[in-house]
Image (cartoon, rainbow, N blue to C red):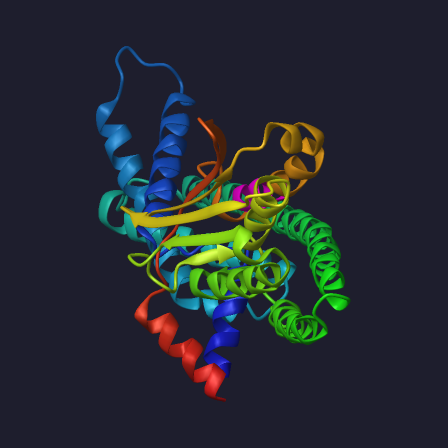
Amino acid sequence: MKTAQHTKNITDDFFVPEFCQAETLLSLVLLAELLVLVLVLAEPMQAGFDWMRLALTSLFVQWIVLLSAAVLCRIRPYLARISASKTIVFTCALVVLLTLLCTAFAEYFFFTGTLSLESRSHLYIRHALISLIMCALLMRYFYLQSQWRRQQQAELQARLKALQARIQPHFLFNSLNSIASLIDSDPARAEHAILDLSDLFRASLSKVNTLSTWQEEKTLAKQYLSIEQYRLGKRLHVVWEVNSVPHDLPMPHLTLQPLLENAIIYGIQPSVQGGSIEINAQYVQGIFKVQVSNPFMPCANSKNTHGTRLALNNIEARLKVLFGPNARLIIQQQLNRYIVSLSYPCSRPSAEATTDENFNRRR
């Protein structure tokens, strides 16, 4: 299984695209047809457009393209194990060879006895050079596109790490303040809060990937709320309406907890009476929506807008990096409630992926 997974990772990072995929194959066919138009239009002008010439040239070029795509599709896992330069040389040589074979086939069936030796030589050389140039240009394009894609991924990962680093110290600082307020008044509860915090950070620091699940984020948030409950007591009331959400939906790590932290700091803490925080979540037609609302305190929010925006900007940036431009984070004020809503398109992990993950965990 490890060998298969390693081979899959290599081929996924390989710069030569998967020609067996319908989308890639369609793009290649359209590009070949564009080349045919250029070749036919580049010939000396005649009284009328030679549609037969266009049809025969198109048939000839599509033979070469489809044969090359079929062979490259089969040998792609082997090409992924050698260097990029060797792959380009081998691919160009393969395409030239297939072009010459198709030329010989076409000559045998369509030009029997009509071409002189010199014309035949020019025909083979012309076809070989055209296929070599086009293949080299195409491979160069694939390679540069792959390098650009890797660079983009590296930049996105760097941004994610930077954003995550800005969130975790802020969370630690506020959690320690909550525990410090309990030390004099209730040492026993402070000890329990420290144990909860250690469990919370053990879960946080053990997370290697940037993506978590809704279940893990909910557990992490409840551990944080338990720490704040020690400090705020009856002033803090939490309402969860999330029963219909699948547990395995993907969610960026440390997304829900900062939303609750802001709700407590700017909605519950400044109020003598406290208030309720409502968490609503739903998953409808491939869109995951989470909404956190808290009492609106104009004085507290006007004085701390910078801190609030910092956390929310970090969350919004991570959502867009991981789930694309359709990810949204919206802030609303409705009467006496302050509402933060986030939504993004996502899908549940497949059964096969879940099985592999469970297998790896057991190992």
Q: Nearer the viewer, residue 67 or 285?
A: 285
Q: How many marks?
A: 0
Image quadrant containing the N terminus: bottom left
Name the residue furthest bottom. 363
Q: Please state the extent of the stretch shown in magenta in the rendering.
A: 314-321
Q: Nearer the viewer, residue 212 or 244?
A: 244
Examine the rendered structure and indicate whether residue 289 appears above or below residue 350: above
Q: Residue at x 33, y 66 (%)?
A: 350
On whether residue 88 falls in the magenta region, the answer is no
Examine the rendered structure and indicate whether residue 192 appears above or below residue 96: below
Q: In this orientation, does residue 92 appear?
A: yes
Q: Nearer the viewer, residue 136 or 307?
A: 307
Q: Nearer the viewer, residue 249 or 178?
A: 178
Q: Residue at x 38, y 31 (%)?
A: 34
Residue 76 falls left or right of residue 354: right
* Residue 67 horizontal/vertical position (percent): 34, 55
Residue 105 falls left or right of residue 264: left
Q: In this orientation, does residue 137 appear?
A: no
Examine the rendered structure and indicate whether residue 46 appears above or below residue 110: above
Q: Residue at x 53, y 60 (%)?
A: 221
The image quarter in which residue 345 lies: top left
The image quarter in which residue 189 lies: bottom right
* Residue 53 horizontal/vertical position (percent): 27, 29
Main SS of the magenta segment? helix
Residue 152 falls left or right of residue 69: right
* Residue 187 horizontal/vertical position (percent): 72, 73
* Residue 181 horizontal/vertical position (percent): 74, 60
On whether residue 319 falls in the magenta region, the answer is yes
